[in-house]
Image (spheres, helix red, strand yellow):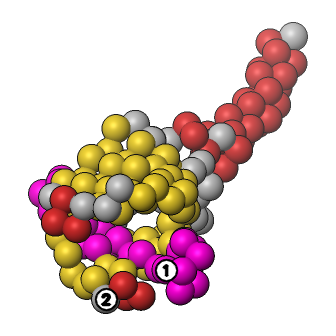
Amino acid sequence: MQKTIMKIIHVILLIIVPVVTLSGLFSSYFNPGSQAQETSLAGEWRGTFNINIGGDREIIFTLTEEAGTLKAVFDSPTEAIMAVSAESVTVTGNNVRILIPRIQGEYFGTIHPDRAPDGQPVRIDGDWSHAGEFMPITINRTLTP
């Protein structure tokens, strides 16, 4: 009787231990939100808008992170605006605000839930305000650091 109980326990352990081990190994695959990953917006973000005068206009934000602080440089090649430093980049939850008073510019957007294979954001939906004009624009990450 005792040998039978020991065999049953042995069989149960042979089944349970591998299942528990494998479920732990694959839990992040089946539940990717279970592992916290720091979101980084560093990289190059591009978008286009059309104001019906002169066709599409492109804007580019190059975001870098220095000592935990985001910084941005703005370019608009079609308007010959290049390398203008943003005064501030603020991220609150999923909202992003880039303020560029030197050109009367501001971008306010929401980080879209789409993610790259590395788990980082690839798209921000928002509005570009320049000299009092508001244009909806989506910016997409084109380069990462």
Which corner quadrant holds the N terminus?
Answer: top right
Q: Secondary structure at mark 2?
A: loop
**Residue 124 visible in rendering:** no
Q: Which residue is mark 1?
A: 57
* Residue at 36 percent of width and 84 percent of height: 79
The earlier-in-sequence mark between 2 and 1 is 1
Q: Looking at numbered disc 2 in the image, what kind of residue is underneath it?
A: Ala
Residue shown at 25% from the left, 61% from the top = 104
Q: Nearer the viewer, residue 109 or 34?
A: 109
Residue 134: give x, y in percent of width and height. 46, 55
Q: Closest to the observer: 78 or 59?
A: 78
Asked whether residue 18 is drawn in magenta, I would say no
Mark 2–mark 1 Cα distance, whole angstroms, equals 11 Å
Residue at x-position 74% and y-position 31%: 16
**Magenta extent:** 48-74
Residue 85 position within the rendered picture, expressed as x and y whole percent measured from the top left: 17, 70
Residue 44 vs residue 113: left or right?
A: left
User: For the stretch drawn in magenta, what is the main secondary structure?
Assistant: strand
Q: Secondary structure at mark 1?
A: strand
Q: Can you say whether 14 is above or below 40 in the image? A: above
Determine whether 27 is above or below 58 in the image: above
